[in-house]
Amino acid sequence: MAGICFKIHTKTKNEKMELHGQVLVLNQDYQPLTVCGVKRAVMLTFMGKAELLHRNPELKIRSVTQSYDYPTVVRLLSYIRVPYNNIVVTRRNILKRDGYRCQYCNAREDLTIDHVIPRSRGGRDTWKNLVTSCASCNIKKGNRTPREASMKLLKKPYKPNHILYLQTIVASVKEDWKPYLYM
């Protein structure tokens, strides 16, 4: 597939688009694994490593001589053993988990990460100890616990599971994806 040029054409207009988009990748047992780009999904199907489950009927991928379906969901033909779906604790992932809102006042601006139990008191960088906080709430709380600062968390911090993380990885979940993401 290297060196082959593809263009995407819509059914309604003859607009040319690039191979950008997201495709849900399922394991052989239909469990969601990850989200990849359209180009990667097309390569997996061409190499015989995946099968197309759902396509976008409005879009076609065209080469000079052939036309192909635009994938939205593909399933791997061989089972991939995933030993542990560990979602890494990062600033970006904490913000996603908390919906980009302060967990003390629900603000959306000037967001930081706060340790529920401060580091100076043995608090660690874990899913259950980090929350999204606006700068003013973080300063107000200071080096205290929420109880000591008379501040209440809107939601208790938790470690997200793999499927919940896949649901939040994309801005909007496509209709084709919902049965596989238990929505």
Image: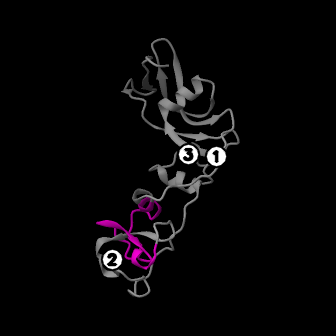
Q: Is residue 173 magenta?
A: no
Above/below status of 172 relative to 118: above
31 relative position to 66: left or right: right
Q: Are marks 2 and 3 in contact (CB under 8 Å)?
A: no
Highlighted magenta segment, given as a residue range: 94-123
Q: Mark 1 is on which residue type?
A: Val
Q: Which mark is residue 137?
A: 2
Q: Earlier in the sequence, mark 3 or mark 1?
A: 1
* Residue at 63% from the left image edge and 36% from the top image edge: 75
Q: Are marks 2 and 1 in contact (CB under 8 Å)?
A: no
Instruction: Return the x and y of residue 166 as percentages of the image width and height.
Output: 53, 51
Instruction: Return the x and y of residue 137 as percentages of the image width and height.
Output: 33, 77
56 relative position to 101: left or right: right
Q: Mark 2 is on which residue type?
A: Cys
Q: Main secondary structure of the magenta part?
A: loop
52 relative position to 144: left or right: right
Which residue is identified by label 1? 82
* Residue closer to the observer: 11 or 81: 81
Q: Is residue 102 magenta?
A: yes
Query: Between marks 2 and 1, how big is the CA–CA gap?
Result: 39 Å
Which residue is identified by label 3? 175
